[in-house]
Image (cartoon, rainbow, N blue to C red):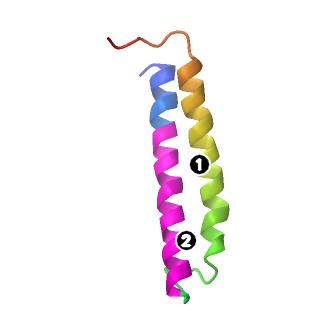
Amino acid sequence: MKLPDLFRTIGVISGLAGLVLMILGVIGFLIGDEFLTVQNFYNRFWIANSFLFLGVFLILAYMSCPNKKKEE
């Protein structure tokens, strides 16, 4: 696996992990009680922020790699 493909793959996985954590945070907020052993719903948003930023920067790194093949 080449480095640009690795950047893209890890970026997409990181972005999806951030999205799942945000959805879990919204569910915890709507339920209002302890959800999946987390009392404060905003704890999930603190972690989701890091995953989303990592995903964005890895996708940007993928797009700026000069050695990727252009699909036609």
The residue that disc 1 covers is 52
Query: From the viewer's perspective, is residue 43 above or below residue 68?
Result: below
Task: State if disc 1 and disc 2 touch (CB < 8 Å).
Answer: no
Quarter of the C terminus within the rendering:
top left
Query: From the viewer's perspective, is residue 68 above or below residue 13?
Result: above
Residue 43 position by quadrant = bottom right
**Amino acid at dot 1:** Leu
N-term mark: 2 or 1: 2
Start and end of the magenta stretch? 11-31
Q: CA distance from mark 2 to mark 1?
A: 14 Å
Residue 34 position by quadrant = bottom right
Secondary structure at badge 2 equals helix
Based on the picture, tell me whether residue 60 belongs to the magenta stretch.
Answer: no
The x, y position of residue 1, in whole percent, is 41, 22
The residue that disc 2 covers is 25
Residue appearing at x 47%, y 60% in the figure: 20
Residue 37 position by quadrant = bottom right
